[in-house]
Amino acid sequence: MSWLNNAIAQVSPKWALNREAARQSYDSIKGYEAAKASRTHKANKEARGANQAVFAAGKSLREQARWLDENHDLSIGILDRMEERVIGAQGIVVEPQPRDLEGNILDDLANELQRRFGNWSLKPDVTSRYSRPELERLALRTALRDGEVFGQHILGRVPKLIHPNEQGTPYSIEALEPDFVPFELNDVAKRIRQGLEVNAWGQVVNVHVLLDHPADKQGFRHKTKAIAKSKMLHLGLFKRLHQLRGISMFHGIMTRLGDIKDYEESERVAARISAALAFVIKRGSPDAYDVGGSKTQDIKFSPGMTTTLAPGEDIDTLESNRPNVHLVDFRNGQLKAAAAGTRGSYSSISRDYSGNYSSQRQELVEQDESNRIMQQWFCAGWSRPVFRNWLKMEQLNKVDPLILPDDLDINTLFDAVYYGPTMPWIDPRKEAQGWEAMIAGNAATEAEWARARGRNPAEVKRQRKREVEYNREHQMVTDNDPDPTLGESNSEETSTKQNASNNARRARRQQRADRAARDGESGN
């Protein structure tokens, strides 16, 4: 009650009660019902700022998520699937798109940049332990599990460091776990908050990094160095505006994952106990049981066995309701809820692929948009800055100098296309027919088709050209030759063989068309 009602209650409790009831009735009329706490609605609230909430819970959530990644199979599977769908085996594919002054792509320069970037990708980090795809998968896993990951651009010559790549490019990456940027480092006078120094507009200008991991027992544990934000990568999961530090992807499902783990462990133990139970021997009357003279009786089991019972004894089997027949349904329901909170798909997390083609494709289509969002997030925060810094330093490569053509539009030198794994195909025939129809209707390009399969369009064209030319040269022309007549020779013998091959190919095409027509009639 308000202070006025409290004062009135001292004189007339009934009057104060009526006033309070009237005030609550008025509040229920003028406001939203969900805004008021009641017996059935808790109306939990979060009034703190974004940085206050992360500061209070971020470190604990990060450590709990790491424990789940180390000990819980489902949590491990969620992160594994995100690695596969966002990064993939080949990492984020980068296709340089430099253009000339007329707007045409310079294929030779693009191919040369891609070759050099591929060579550098063998050893991109300062430790020389990871390839670029491995480093990207580790960076993504850290960002999802811990909420964020940091990386330092090591540009040019640095004391006591030899860049591990062997192509002479003076550029490497130092990947850092979020522990290196301490949550506890706050200085109001210097505008340092949770290890990040900001200006008056809220822009991060410096990142204060520990010289050693805080868990190390040796070294300068609490000494930090300020690194300019332009030299730092910071890939984080942000849920609110003005949020400086990221929050774990598991923040909304951590309790559910812990409950699933504990429940499954309890069910497994109960099933093991149930499997060890056999039967008990019952005596008809308590008077027939001699406590002092009783001994443990061991009975050996074998198929078709019988045993002799004493007078008044009877055998009773112990029945158990384990394994729980409802365990699978309950677990699957919990996994669907967990998948909804992680941008993951239920099928890939639970390994449950039951369902027809339409339902599976619908799930893939919906999941594909989530994958694209995560890929865009990763490319913007990690892959694009890495490629652009590499290309900037590649121009300083003295071992193998990069020669730029005279007709290059220098404003397009850093242009590139970034993409990760694409939506997998359930039925390749239907997918291929759909792409063929879109290309025939000028609604798509062959390059888009190649990228949809996770391939480089230029590389596909080169391989295709070599294959077609080889087949024509050796009279191995197949049905997929775009124009078999181009491979015909002037010699009469070769021409005869080619004509025979063409006739056989046309016959096979006609057979397939007739078979497809018969299948269509039978389907109708």
Image (cartoon, rainbow, N blue to C red):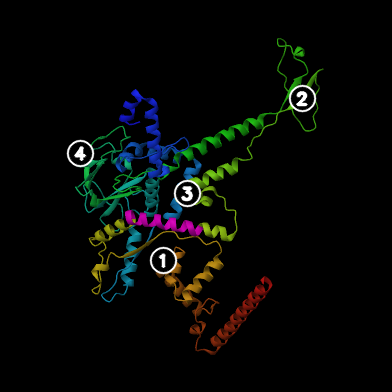
Counting residues from the N terminus, which is met first, the one under dot 1 or under dot 4? 4
2 vs 4, front mark? 4
Can you give x and y, in whole percent of width and height, for residue 46 in the image?
A: 36, 40
* Residue labelled with disc 1: 456
Which residue occupies the foreground of this view, 265 or 370?
Answer: 370
1 vs 4, front mark? 4
Secondary structure of residue under mark 4 = loop
Secondary structure of residue under mark 3 = helix
Counting residues from the N terminus, which is met first, the one under dot 4 or under dot 3? 4
Residue type at mark 1 is: Asn
398 to 267, vertically: above or below: below
Question: How far apart, in angstroms, are the residues tagged by discs 3 and 2?
Answer: 51 Å
Question: How far apart, in angstroms, are the residues tagged by discs 2 and 1?
Answer: 73 Å
Which class describes the residues within 10 Å of circle 1: few (<14), some (14-19), or many (20+)?
Answer: some
Left or right of residue 448, residue 393 in this image: left
Can you give x and y, in whole percent of width and height, for residue 33 in the image?
A: 42, 43
Per the rendering, the mark at residue 315 is 2
Which residue occupies the foreground of this view, 84 or 371?
Answer: 371
* Residue labelled with disc 3: 340
Per the rendering, the mark at residue 7 is none
Residue type at mark 4 is: Val
1 vs 3, front mark? 3
**CB within 8 Å, label 2 to label 1:** no
Counting residues from the N terminus, which is met first, the one under dot 3 or under dot 2? 2
283 to 335, vertically: above or below: above
Per the rendering, the mark at residue 188 is 4
Question: How far apart, in angstroms, are the residues tagged by discs 1 and 3?
Answer: 32 Å
